[in-house]
Every structure is written in C-alpha cells, then in structure tokens.
Image (spheres, helix red, strand yellow):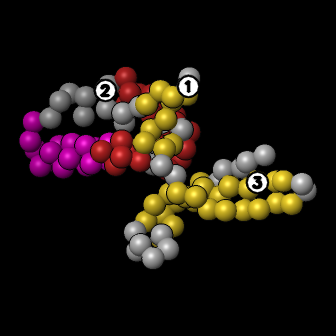
Amino acid sequence: MVHLILDEDVVEAGGGGTGYYAEVQTESKGRKKRTKVKIEAFTIAEFCAAHRISRATYYNLKKKNQGPAEAHVLGRIIITRESAAAWRQARTAATSAYLSGKPVSENY
C-alpha cells in the first residue's frame, strides 16, 4: 500500500530550491518504509491543495480557458510541474496587467 501526503515548499537537499514532495509509505512483509519523493505531476485534487484553490474554482477557471494544461494518461488527468509553473506565470501576468490598467480579456 502506498500513501501520498503533500508536503509543500520543502527545501531540496543540496539544491537550495523549493518544490512539492510526497511522503510515500510502502509496506512489505510487515515492515514499513517512508521515503520522500519529488512530485513531478499533480492530480487535480493535489494541484488544488498545492495552489490553495477549491475544485470548484479549478473547474470555473478551466471553463474560462484559464486553467493549467492537462495531460490524460490511462484515463487519469495529471498536471505536470511545468504546466503548473506556466499557469502560475500566466495568472501573475494577467493580474499585473489588470492592476496596471492594461486591457485584459473579459475572462480575467
């Protein structure tokens, strides 16, 4: 059995950067082992938790074509780390444009 626990903004060992990690607990022959692994792709629920938005907000943004790029893998939807970063940059740029009075789409 594997349990994933989102642990955000953990400093990478030796890298000095931040990222998202999951604690993976495996059980084999009655012995438990915990390991931290870097998250390279989010489920929708993990993306929402990591970015502190509700699932309703996620789907509202998606309806307005303002959500992150999704990848469909074996019937599951994932959002890559790169897609999440691109989404954050796009949202930041749209917010900056809006606050500076520049014209932005009505879907801001």
Amino acid type for the residue under numbered disc 3: Thr
In this picture, residue 95 sits left or right of residue 24: left
Query: Among all residues in the image, which is located at the extreme bottom?
Result: 14
- Residue 104 lies, with reference to residue 84, above or below; the image says above
Residue type, mark 1 in image: Leu
Picture residue at 42% right of the left edge, 42% below the top = 80
Along the viewing direction, whichever of 37 and 60 lies nearer the viewer? 37
Tell me which segment is drawn in magenta.
87-103
* Above or below 8: residue 42: above
Mark 2: few, some, or many residues within 10 Å (few <14, many ≥20)? few
- Magenta residues: mostly which secondary structure? helix
Q: Earlier in the sequence, mark 1 or mark 3?
A: 3
* Left or right, 28 with reference to 99: right
Q: Residues within 10 Å of mark 1 (few under 14, many from 20)?
A: few
Is residue 4 at least partly visible in the picture?
yes
According to the picture, the residue beneath numbered tag 1 turns out to be 74
Residue sitting at x 15%, y 35%: 104
Percent across and percent down for residue 78 are 49, 35
50 and 81: which one is in front?
Answer: 81
Q: Position of residue 84 (x, y in %)?
A: 38, 45
Question: On the picture, is 102 further left or further right than 92?
Answer: left
Going by the picture, which residue comes out furthest to the right? 30
Determine whether, in the image, residue 104 is placed left or right of residue 80: left
Residue that lies at the very extreme toward the left in this rendered image:
102
> Where is mark 3, residue-wise?
26
User: Residue at label 2?
Assistant: 65
Residue 95 seen by the camera? no
**Which residue is rendered at x = 45% and y = 60% of the image?**
19
At x 56%, y 23%, the residue is 75
